[in-house]
Image (cartoon, grey):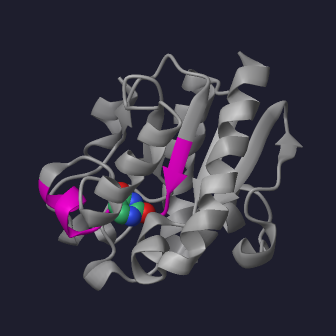
Amino acid sequence: QLYETCRNCQRCALADTRTNLVFGDGCPDTPIMFIGEGPGEQEDKQGLPFVGRAGQLLDQMLDIIDLDRSKYYICNIVKCRPPRNRDPLNLEQDACIGWLNEQIRIIQPKIIVCLGRIAACRLIRDDYKITREHGQWVQKNGVWLTAIYHPSALLRDESKRPETFDDLKSIRSKLKECT
Ligand code: URA
């Protein structure tokens, strides 16, 4: 029902340029959600999150800790593609966040993993420093939150991958602890 309502959303100008709204993918009956910033070109075309190059890398990374989309839910802060993949504006995030809050309310995850700075600033703390704080855990309203580098950042800078591997192991431990 939420998807059906969201599908026709016109709350911000991104509605005018989208091909498809990208609601989310994976298993809604899960203890763990991954949240990125917003759809890119491939996601906009297919209507699914993280299906482009960054998504392929994310799939490979999560496979290392034995997670695939039958075991987690994945979506974004904004559900429509920002033109030329620019960062989503605060105005757009504000217009869209209600949908995400509803998704979180329905799924009731025990763990939320922010993918990159934009999601971390929105969901953890507005002055979150991804370089310094990635992999750390905070608890908010009974939910454990952490952030890892966005897979696009790992495509640009491979030197960040070992740290992300440590963060993934920490996510695996937290998931064991919580389930
Ligand atoms: N980057 C994101 O943040 N989200 C996607 O769905 C794809 C790329």
Image coords of residue 85 (percent x, y): 33, 79
Q: Nearer the viewer, residue 146 or 9?
A: 146
Q: Nearer the viewer, residue 61 or 150?
A: 61
Residue 93, given in percent of the width and then of the height, sits at 53, 65
Q: Position of residue 128 (x, y in %)?
A: 78, 71
Residue drawn 60% across and 55% down? 165
Residue 105 lies left or right of residue 58; in this view the side is: right
Q: Looking at the figure, which quarter contains the N terminus?
A: top left
Q: Which residues are magenta?
A: 34-45
Does residue 35 belong to the magenta stretch? yes
Up-down: is 145 above or below 174? below
- Image position of 76 with respect to 26: above or below: below
The quarter of the image holding the C terminus is top right
Is residue 115 one of those drawn in magenta?
A: no
Q: Residue at x 73, y 51 (%)?
A: 146
Residue at screen point 64% across, 27% down: 109
Q: Residue 74's image quarter?
A: top left
Q: Quadrant of ligand 1?
A: bottom left
Judged left or right of residue 154, residue 109 is right
Where residue 61 sits in the image (x, y, percent)?
A: 45, 50
Residue 38 visible in the current orientation: no
Label tally: 0
x 84%, y 30%: residue: 142
- Is residue 140 visible in this depiction of the protein? yes
Q: Quadrant of residue 105?
A: top right
Q: Is residue 135 left or right of residue 85?
A: right
